[in-house]
Image (cartoon, coloured by chain):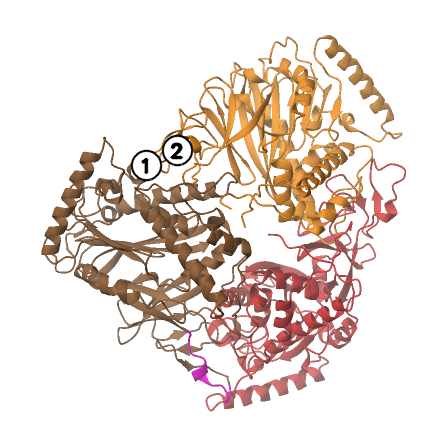
Chain colours: A brown, B orange, C red
Amino acid sequence: MHHMEKKLKVSKEIQSLIAERLPGHSLDAPFYLSPEIFDLDIREIFSKHWIHVAVEPDIPEPGDYVTVEIGLNSIVVVRDDDMAVRAYHNVCRHRGARLCSEHKGSVGNLVCPYHQWTYNIGGELIYAEHMGEKFDRSKHSLKSVHVENLAGLIFICLAEQPPQDFSVMRDAMAPYLLPHGLKDCKIAKQVDLIEEGNWKLTMENNRECYHCATNHPELTASLFEFGFGYQSAPGNAEQIAEFNRLAAERCGEWERGGLPSAEIERLDELVTGFRTQRLPLDRAGESQTLDGKVASGKLLGEFERADLGGLSFWTQPNSWHHFMSDHIVSFSVLPLSAERTLVRTKWLVHKDAREGIDYQLDNLTAVWNATNDQDKRLVELSQQGARSSAYQPGPYSPFTEGLVEKFCTWYIGRLSAGLAEQSAGSPVTMLRRID
Amino acid sequence: MHHMEKKLKVSKEIQSLIAERLPGHSLDAPFYLSPEIFDLDIREIFSKHWIHVAVEPDIPEPGDYVTVEIGLNSIVVVRDDDMAVRAYHNVCRHRGARLCSEHKGSVGNLVCPYHQWTYNIGGELIYAEHMGEKFDRSKHSLKSVHVENLAGLIFICLAEQPPQDFSVMRDAMAPYLLPHGLKDCKIAKQVDLIEEGNWKLTMENNRECYHCATNHPELTASLFEFGFGYQSAPGNAEQIAEFNRLAAERCGEWERGGLPSAEIERLDELVTGFRTQRLPLDRAGESQTLDGKVASGKLLGEFERADLGGLSFWTQPNSWHHFMSDHIVSFSVLPLSAERTLVRTKWLVHKDAREGIDYQLDNLTAVWNATNDQDKRLVELSQQGARSSAYQPGPYSPFTEGLVEKFCTWYIGRLSAGLAEQSAGSPVTMLRRID
Amino acid sequence: MHHMEKKLKVSKEIQSLIAERLPGHSLDAPFYLSPEIFDLDIREIFSKHWIHVAVEPDIPEPGDYVTVEIGLNSIVVVRDDDMAVRAYHNVCRHRGARLCSEHKGSVGNLVCPYHQWTYNIGGELIYAEHMGEKFDRSKHSLKSVHVENLAGLIFICLAEQPPQDFSVMRDAMAPYLLPHGLKDCKIAKQVDLIEEGNWKLTMENNRECYHCATNHPELTASLFEFGFGYQSAPGNAEQIAEFNRLAAERCGEWERGGLPSAEIERLDELVTGFRTQRLPLDRAGESQTLDGKVASGKLLGEFERADLGGLSFWTQPNSWHHFMSDHIVSFSVLPLSAERTLVRTKWLVHKDAREGIDYQLDNLTAVWNATNDQDKRLVELSQQGARSSAYQPGPYSPFTEGLVEKFCTWYIGRLSAGLAEQSAGSPVTMLRRID
C-alpha cells in the first residue's frame, strides 16, 4: 500500500441518514456538522464531479497559474504554451513538497523549492539532480487532473473517470454565455470570504430569494424578488402578474436579438446539474448595481445596448454566475471543514475597461460585497442552530424554496449513487481530514 | 430518524472509571480530559439537572431576554407579558437559524432573521410567509424548556422530566434569600471569564478554601479562612476556637433578628444538591470588600444594619452566590469543552443605588475580580497536570476538602444513576460535540 | 484502574504501514499526518529513548531548573545541591497541579502553588498541611525521570528501563566533545521556533544537505556542501576531489593536535543511534558565521587556535549540535502534535565572553536563525504536500539522502521493536492526546 488508496467505511448511521432523508425538508443536522459526512462530501461530491475553480482571465498568458484547494488536495491550474489550460496535483514526486505556494503566479517551469526537481508545464520531470543512473524521470511526472472550459469558466474533476455529461451543459450553455465574452475580460476584484458554516448551507442560501426582501436591500435594488417563486396572495398577485408580463416581453426581445434567455432547469436530473435564466432587472434595468445602471462604460463582447438584464447560471455543486451587459460576477464555493466554507467572488469587466475611468471599483462591487456579508451571517446563524439538540429538519416553502429542494435532492442522489458504486467494488481514494 | 435522538454509547472503559472511582481522592484524569466524558457530562449533568443561568434583574421588563449556551444548545430566557419567566430553544422551526444572536436584548416577538418566521413570547408561531395552505403553524411552536425561579435566581432544566426536588431547595432557601431582595437589584457589572480547564476543576476549586491563605489576599481580607475546615494544630487551635465562638455568637444574633443563618448541607444527598451558611466577616465585618465595609451605601431589601456577614449559597452542579447586606455576587459555571469553561460573575446592587455616588464599581468588584483571576490560574495549572501520564488521583484533606469530596460524590452518583436509567431503556438526546 | 496505564491498541492499518515501509523512499503519508501515529511516536520513540532536552549551562547553580514538554508530560530538570542533575514529572502528588509553570527559574524547594505541598530538590514531600495523622508523606514523593549527562548535553528518558547503550555513545563521544568545554559555557541566546509540520519532516530535513545550495545562502557561506554526499558528475568531480583532499589533510592535523575528528556513524544500528564528524569550513574556516571567522573572541576550553572546523554531533531521535572553536549551536526537536513541532536552538559561548565586546549577538546567530527560518518553510511545504491524496512516497537520492534513509530505518525499526515488545505482554502508559 504505497499510495493512499483505501475504502473509506461509511457507517450504518450515515447510510440511514442518506436513505431516510425527508423530502421537502432541510437536511438532518449531521449533514451540516459531522466530520465523517464532510469527508464523504469531499470524496463523493468534490472529488467526483465537475468543480468550478477559475475563469480564463485568472491565467491569461502561458505560464500563468492559480492554485486551488479541494479538501486537502492542492491543484495548480496553468496555461500551457499552446494556450490550453492544464491542471496538476501541486505535489512534488520526490518528497511531496508543495510546488506552488502562492494563490497566483507565473512560471517558466514548475520547480520544487525543496531540491529543485523541475517539471515543464506539460507535467514532465525534466531535471532532478543526484538521483543516479537508474532513476527513470519518465515515471515521475506530475499527476494530472481533468479540465473543462465552458466559455471561459474553468472546471476540474479529480476523478479518473469524470462525469460524461459535461458536454450536455456545454452544448446548452455556450450560446447563452459566449456573447458576454468572458475570455476578453479581466478580473477587477476578487474577494475570498470565509463563512463559519457547512458548504451546503451556503448553497441552500444561494438557491432561494425568500430571504432577500428583508436581508438584501442592495441586491433587491435591481433584482425583482418575484423571479424566484412567490406565493400568490391578495397583496402581491398583481405585482407577480406584472413581473411575469415584463419578463416574457423582455425575453422575447432578447431572443429576437440573438441572446438566448429562456430558462433551462436541469438541476437534479443530470450528474452535472445546472440551471440558467435571463431575467429583467429593476430600476435602470441594466446591471446588478445600486442604481441599476451599468458599472462599466465599456460593454462586454459585441454588445451595443446595456439593458440586457441579468443572465444567471447555477451549477451543482459549487458555483453561480451573473452575466450582465457590462460585467460578470462569478462565485465558487470551496468547503474547508464541516463547519467552515470559502466563498470566492470575482468581478470581471472588459479587459480594456480602465479603473477610475470606465468603472469605479466601489460601485462595481457594492451590491455583492454587501450581499455576501449578509448571506455569511445567515449561513452562520443556520450553522449555530444545526448544532442544537432542538434542531430538526423544517419544511421548505413549496413556492420559494423549490430550488433548495432540488439542490438537496441532487446532493442526496449523488451520495447514494456513490455508495452504490462503491459497494459494487470500485476502490476509492480516501481524503484524510486534519484534526 | 428525522430528529437527533439516539443512544450515546458509553464505553466500558468509562463505565469502569465511574464504577471504580477511589473515594477521598481527586478524579481520574479522563474526567478532566476526555471529550467522550465531556459529552456525557453535558448529557447526564447539564441536560438533566437544574442549571443556574440568570437572575431576575437580567430581564426586568416584558420582552427582555438573555441567551445562554449549555453544551451546543442555545436557550433564550425571556420575560413574558405576565411577568413570568419562560425559556425556549433558540432555534427556528423552519431551517434552524438561531433566533436571538445577542447575549441580551429586548423584543416584541421572536422573529427569525432568515425568513421572518415570527413567534410570540409564548412560543407560538404567529407568522410564516409563502408556506401554502396545508402548512400548520400550530405544529411549529418553539421548543420550550423548564424554568424555576428561587428568590430571583433563575434555573432551567433541559430534560422533559426535571428533578422533582427543586421544591426542597426552594422551601429551605427562600427564607434565607428573600430578605436580600434580589428582585429589586440591578446588575452593576457582569464579567465572563474563560478558564482553560475542565468545569469540574472549577467546581472543585470553589468548594474549598485550603488554597485561600496563600492565593487570595484580597478575598481573605474579609473572609475568615477558618470557616472552611481547618486541621486543628498547636499553632492555630486558639484562632479556630475564637472563630467558632464568634460565628456562634453572630449567627444567634442574626437569627434572633429574623435572618436564618444556620448551615444547611445537602450537597450529596439530593439530586438538586445545595448548601448554605451565613458566616461573620473579618475587618469591618460588613461585606466582601478590601476593607470589609459595604461597597454600596444603599442597603438591600429592608435592611437597616450593614454588619450581616456573608450568606453563601452553593448549588450542584454549577453555581454559588454570596449575599451581603449591600450587594450580591452570583456565579455560574458553563462548560465549553473538556478543557475550557466559562465562569460568569454578576455583581448586584439595589436598583436605586447610583454608580459613582452610592457605590464605586472598582471597589465593588475588586475582591472577586482578583479572586477569579487567581482561581483561573490554579484551575489551569491543575488541568495541565491532569494531562501528564504521571498524574494520579491524590488524597483530599479530610479537614479542608470535605466539600470537594461531596461534589465528586454527587457527580459520580449522578453519572451512575444516569447510566442505570439508560440501561433501563429510556432514549436519550445526544448532544454532538464540535471538532 | 486508578492510574492511567492501559494498552494502547495499534490498528492493523498502522501495523501494515510499519511492516510494509518501502526502503529508500519517504514515509507513507499517515506517518506525517495521523494523530494515532503521533501518539505512537510519543509512546514508542519519545517515551522510551534518550531525548536531548537541555545543556548544563541551562542550570548552572543548585536550585536552577528548566521545564520541558514531551508529549503531554511536563518534566522539570533541576540542579541538586550536590551539583547532580535530577529530573521529575512536574506534577503535584496532591491534586496534580503543575509545580513549575515557567520555562526556567531557580528554587529552594519545589512548592506547589495550589496548596503549598512542598518537595525538596531530591523529590521528597517535606510539607503538606491539613492532611491528618494517617497521611504518609513518604508515599507522595515526586515521580522521578532518568537523566544522563554527556559532556554537558543533558538527556532524559521517561521509561522505567531506559536503553542501556547510552554508555556506548558516551564512551565514543566524550573525547570529541569535552575539549569544547560546554560546561564552562553560557547560553547567549535561545530561540524556540514552531514549525507547522510533523517532527519527522524536521529530522529528515536535518539529515541532508541536498537542499542547501539553493535554500541556505548564509549556511553555505561556511559549509562545504560536498561534505554531505554528492553525485560525482563532469561538472563537480574536481571540486569533490579537492574537498576530500582538504578534509583528509585537516582531520589528520586536528587528530595529531589531540582533537578526535574521524567520522563515527552508528545511526541505525544502535537503540541510542548517533553520528559525528569534524569537517573543515569554507572562507576563514573558523566558524559557522557569514564570513567564516569566529563570532566570539574568547575561545572555548583550552583552545589556542580558531581554525578547528566544525564538529557535528547528530542523535536519534531529536537533536544535533555543531561545536566550533568559539561557540556551540545546539538543537532539540520536540513534537507538539502530528502537524506541529518545536525546534529549540541554543547558541553557547564561553561563560567569560562579554556580549558587545567579545561577541555580537546578531553576528553569532545570523547563520542559524536564517537557516532555521528557511528550513521551517521547507518542512511546511512538505507537510502540505503530504496531506494530498496525490502524495506517494518518493525516492531518496542514493548520494545525498543516505542519512535521511538511516533516520527512517531507525524510526521504523524502533516502532517495530516496540510493537513486538508490547505483544510480548508488557503494559504501556498511554499518553493522551488533547483534541
The amino acid pointed to by label 1 is: Gly
Which residue is depicted at the point 67% across and 31% down? B316
How would you classify the magenta stretch by its main secondary structure? loop
**To which residue does mark 1 refer?**
B132
Label total for image? 2
The chain ID associated with circle 2 is B
Which residue is depicted at the point 49% across and 63% down? A431
SS type, badge 2: loop
> Who is closer to the viewer here, C164 or C152?
C164
**Among all residues in the image, which is located at the extreme front?**
B134
Count neighbours of disc 2 (C-alpha within 10 A) and say few if under 14, some if 14 to 19, many if 20 or more. few
Residue C246 x %, y %:
59, 86
The chain ID associated with circle 1 is B
The amino acid pointed to by label 2 is: Asp
SS type, badge 1: loop
**To which residue does mark 2 refer?**
B136
Disc number for residue C19: none
Placement of B361 over or under A155, stated as above or below: above
Q: Are marks 1 and 2 in contact (CB under 8 Å)?
A: no
Left or right of C115 on screen, residue A300? left
Residue B120 x %, y %:
42, 26
- For marks 1 and 2, give the CA distance: 9 Å
Quadrant location of residue B195? top right
Residue C361 x %, y %:
57, 61
Give the residues in magenta.
Answer: A132-143
Placement of C209 over or under B94, stated as above or below: below
Residue B102 x %, y %:
45, 33
